[in-house]
Amino acid sequence: MMRAKDDLPQDVSESVETLDQALKGANYITARKLTTELTTSSELDTVLELLARYAKSQPQATELLVEVLDATGTVRRFAAGALLDQTAVDDVSQDALISIADSVDSYDGRSKVTTWVHTIVRRRVVDHLRRQRSTVPLEDHDMSPAARMSSIIATRATVHEALEALPDLYKVPVVLRDIEGHAYANIAERLDRPEGTIKAQIARGRAMVAAHLRDTGVTE
């Protein structure tokens, strides 16, 4: 649970109050500046809980939440505690950030945000290990050319439809990253946004695409 402001040093308490007011007023420039300052202090949990509260109704607060979790290495640290392969850690961390952005409404405030995040990371680790153990039920060469082509066209069309439905704020960085293959740093420079923001927006955009694909029955 979030610490009472009376329990914080005066300057930190004032910053937390200002951050609260900035989020309430949708002043994300000030909120990002204060978030950066506060997460370098000992008040990471306090900041995360504020962001999680506002993320339920503000997509930009969700971006900030994902940005902080990525920038502080919180998600990666949890993943690295369960996996040895660094590529797997990278993949699971990105999957977890997408899940966090997609399921922020499920955070009920009864535990620390980091505890909730840890649970999500554990699930993504289990998913990763299960995929590694599972056998592929049907290889491409076992499908007829017509069936394979139909599957590819249908999937690509649905993904394209999901991408087109995204707001430009998320669509542009997702396309640059996942379709055109640009590095995060290059996308940040091209769009003149902080790299952490780009990662958060891509995570959010991917979550929205994944939700669309689930709704259309492309994924389970």
Image: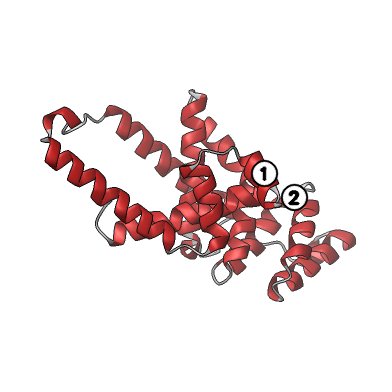
- Nearest to the observer: residue 10 or residue 7: 10
Q: In x, y percent, where is residue 130? A: 31, 34
Report whether 18 appears left or right of 148.
right
- Nearest to the observer: residue 26 or residue 108: 26
Q: Residues within 10 Å of mark 1 (few under 14, many from 20)?
A: some
- Res. 60 in view: yes
Report whether 33 appears left or right of 55.
right
For numbered disc 1, what is the local secondary structure?
A: helix
Asked if disc 2 and disc 1 are in contact, CB closer than 8 Å, the reply is yes
For numbered disc 2, what is the local secondary structure?
A: helix
Outermost residue on the right side: it is: 11
Q: In x, y percent, where is residue 74? A: 61, 42
Residue at x-position 69% and y-position 72%:
26
Going by the numbered disc 1, the residue's amino acid type is: Ala
> Nearer the N terminus, badge 2 or badge 1?
2
Nearest to viewer (mark 2 / mark 1) = 1
Residue at x-position 13% and y-position 42%:
147
Marks 2/1: CA–CA distance: 9 Å
Where is 31 relative to 147, above or below? below
Where is 76 relative to 57, above or below? above
Outermost residue on the top side: it is: 84
The image quadrant of residue 132 is top left
- Nearest to the observer: residue 55 or residue 199: 199
Residue at x-position 66% and y-position 52%:
191
Quadrant of the image containing the N terminus: bottom right
Q: In x, y percent, where is residue 21? A: 75, 73
Q: Residues within 10 Å of mark 2 (few under 14, many from 20)?
A: some
* Residue 71 disc label: 1
Colour logic: secondary structure
- Res. 211 in view: no
* Residue 39 disc label: 2
* Residue 90 disc label: none
